Amino acid sequence: MKIIRNPMVILACCFVALFGVVLLPLMSGAQGVPNAEICNGKDDNGNGVADEGVNCDHYLSYLLDKSIQPISVVLRDQFINQTDFTLVLIERLLNPVRKLHAGIVFNPRRPDLHYLAYRVQSQATFTPRTVFIQNQFEQRPIVVTKPRYLLTPTGKKKIGIPFDKLPPNAAEKVISALVPPVPQNANHYLCWDIEPYELAKGVTLRDQFQQKQFEVIRARYLCNPVEKTHNGKVHQIVDEKNHLVCYEVIPHNTVNRNVLTHDQFGVKSLKAVRTEEICVPTVKTLLPAECIPAPEICDGLDNDCDASTDEELGQTTCGVGVCQRTVNSCVAGEPQQCIPGVGGSETCNNLDDDCDGAVDEGIPSTPTSCGTGACQATGASSCVNGAFVNSCTPGPSSSEVCNSIDDDCDGIVDDVPGLGSACTGGGTNTTGVCTANYTCTGVPGPGPSGLTCTQTVSPSPESCNTLDDDCDGSVDEDLVCA
């Protein structure tokens, strides 16, 4: 069985299931059906002409912060019937801009057409709607949540100084001489917040303020053509197919340009502060709202009807120790299998190398010894917290005595003080040539530190040598010596 993963085909199938009709324009490459033409520099419908019949003007928006007296309007677009709104602030100036992306250049067809973005407020409640958008950057479904801006067709001129720095009479003369006309035959737009999502596109933009490379990072607004009523005057939609999607760009570089603007609400002196968004022409298709929520599963579809696909399905972890692995449970609509790693021999490193759930187990201890003489001891080298630890501790030392033991643990046996020095007593004879010295006999003796006074030169028969050889206190006795 062949599984269909093409989101365009899935989308078309949803229309068949819900309404009994096929959404052919969204099915890219459907046999015998030309693709819908979008502004992308390409011949989408195969008639030999690129971008025919579609709006290709792009706009670069700048931050404004202009307080105004509240303005009441009634607005109607493809999402809402006539609804009361109040305009409370001017937050954006939209300049027509030359855009270079993917090697394709888009020049403004109406360089005189600018827009002011008025922040709107309303007591009405709004239901999120799902639409499918197609432009040069992307083709995807998005969710719009609530209205944010009313865009009004605006004439604009750059000015060198703000009018509030001129004397009143001079300001009136300058304004009357410079005021630009209000562009005609142009749509108003109602811009809706969308659930934001990120993307990464590089563009080069040039307008009356700057020429610079920007990075497109986030989708912000969808702008619908809107019918506006103010003070009983109705401004109809000029082209209901022209939509805009506005994306945040970086850097938000400062420009601080003074401009004179003119729209249906009057003439204003404004300052464009910094770059905010690029608004690109977009084809929009309203998707069916009938979605029956179900638990989200990994299938590339929005099962729980929250406009997100395969979200919050988490991760899967398998294996233990160094074999443990973690993978995303779902990738590109496909469930992912978690495969643990392969273990090895256990080593002393505080890790579970053999992946059996135990750390450093089964590593044998090695016998060790330490110290010398009476201090000598035994122990073992064992694995503790990922490192080998020797448990052997030398014993305490003591003063050296004559006992055939190295009591002071200096590596020398019976090296007691006084060893070899002359001594008396203990049955020794030290008269005449006889001498005695302290020695160690292997067992403790009566002398200091266990020394024993030992006869080293004993008595011998007397001889004629003027010495007391027999150590009896007499010299050469009982002998006739010459």
Image (cartoon, rainbow, N blue to C red):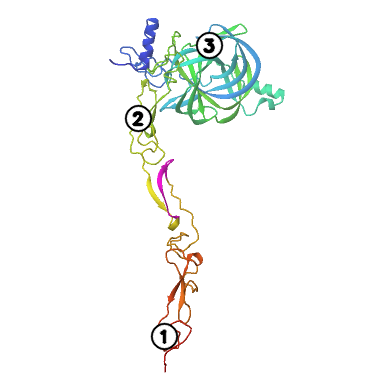
Q: Is residue 258 magenta?
A: no
Q: Secondary structure at mark 1?
A: loop
The residue positioned farthest toward the top in the image shown: 20
318 relative to 350, above or below: above
> Which residue corresponds to mark 2?
340
- Between disc 2 and disc 1, whose residue precedes? 2
The disc labelled 2 sits on which kind of residue?
Pro
The disc labelled 3 sits on which kind of residue?
Val
**For the residues marked 3 and 2, what is the alpha-carbon distance in whole angstroms?**
57 Å
Residue at 48% x, 83% y: name it: 473
Does residue 190 appear in this view?
A: no
| Residues packed near mark 1 inside 10 Å, few (<14), some (14 to 19) or many (20 plus) | some
Left or right of residue 123: residue 278:
left
**Image position, residue 25 (x, y; %):** 38, 12
Does residue 283 appear in this view?
A: yes
**Image position, residue 321 (x, y; %):** 39, 33
**Image quarter of the C terminus:** bottom left
Left or right of residue 213: residue 182:
right
Q: Which residues are magenta?
A: 375-388
The disc labelled 1 sits on which kind of residue?
Glu
> Which residue corresponds to mark 3?
226
Q: Is residue 377 magenta?
A: yes
Residue at 50% x, 58% y: name it: 398
Instruction: Tell me whether circle 1 and circle 3 mark residues in contact (CB < 8 Å).
Output: no
